Image: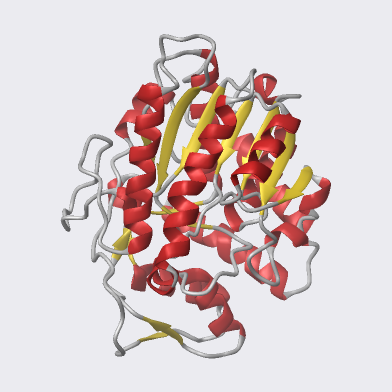
Amino acid sequence: MIGRATGNLNRTFWAGRRVFVTGHTGFKGSWALAMLKELGAVVTGFSLDPPTSPCLFDLIDGAMLCDDHRGDIRDAGTLARAVAAAQPEIVLHMAAQPLVRESYVTPVQTYATNVMGTVHLLEACRTVSGVGAIVVVTTDKCYENNGWVWGYRENDRLGGADPYSNSKAACELVVDSYRRSFFSVDDPAVPRLGSARAGNVIGGGDFAVDRLIPDAIRAFAAGEKLSIRNPLAVRPWQHVLEPLTGYLCLAERLFETRDAAEGWNFGPPTEESASVETVAGMVAARWSNGVGWVQDAGFHPHEAATLKLDSTKARLELGWSPVFDLETAVRATTDWYLGHHNGDNMRDFTMNQVHDYLRKLT
């Protein structure tokens, strides 16, 4: 039965389940591989090469956790052949150009990946029988940001000033069109299609540039102060395992019923949203070498000052809600980087964090 206690997953459902994951070599995709491995799923991954060096995918021996395929979701033919070969039951679409500032540098690539890449994935799923559920992962930034102090709900207006946010809003519109045009809930022969909008995800193994915690770890490890663009900006921070659990809860529900084919927020309680300076201070205190942060006074492209998500619908209808509060999420994240800094076996470290997290769901 779907919709059990806080964020609980049905392990029996995932055992042996064929899952196709796009973006599996990325930060969130690698955590998804670890979680699906723990749950016993049979995973096929489709992605570009890992986007950073070092990368979580290599640190956890990600190629051993899945049938590892490399390709670009902008290449419709290659993607379609990979989906057809995998014959998946569940599709989890996470491949994306995920960075706001990068989208200002490469807007055409951002739209091509985030919008047309999604079109290609959905087209591929139309040609393969047996796909029961598709979850397209977008972002909390898909909403038209009005600077509200309350959380955005799934029926609020989509939009976005920067190319990244705007492309993700467009991706949501693509999902809605395909859902109504090709994946009708009244047709039992077609997949059920939902979208997932997560908050600002943190966790060990993110080595991207222009993300708060990876930038902080690089600075602190070098004994330097972190330079912050917008210290008062408020975001819905959450550990990566929280939204991943939400995605899988949604996939279960879509596979087993027809009443969840819509958009869903997966974020922390609005009171757990916090400023950039608060999170940076928590990481600095945990790293405990006396470093801190300074404000970068240079020119920076527009970024929203406040963003919160209202995840009431997921809590009430899917039985999902976060397990970690902000302090626990930051501690787990910083401890991962401390382990990496100290030369620990990060495959074991990561799998242990996944195992311990899933135990909390029972």
In the current view of this chain or complex, which residue is farthest to the right? 64
Q: Residue at coordinates 45% horizontally, 21% vertically from top-left?
A: 183
Q: Answer whether residue 48 is visible to the viewer in this image.
A: yes
Q: Nearer the viewer, residue 135 or 153?
A: 135
Horizontal and vertical percent for residue 142?
A: 32, 49
Residue 117 against residue 86 in the figure, above or below? below
How far across and down, in percent of the image, does residue 214 sit?
Answer: 54, 72
Residue 195 placement (x, y as % from top left): 42, 35
The location of residue 233, given as percent across then percent down, is 28, 68
- The one nearer the camera, 322 or 259, is 259
Taking the image as shown, residue 135 lies to the left or right of residue 312, namely right
Residue at 55% x, 38% y is 121
Residue toward you, 10 or 66: 66
Instruction: Count the marks.
Output: 0
Q: Is residue 13 above or below residue 47?
A: above
- Split into 4 quadrants, where in the image is the N terminus? top right
Residue at left offset 55%, top offset 83%: 220
Q: Quadrant of the C terminus?
A: top right
Q: Can you see residue 261?
A: no
Q: Residue at the spot x=51%, y=76% of the render?
A: 215
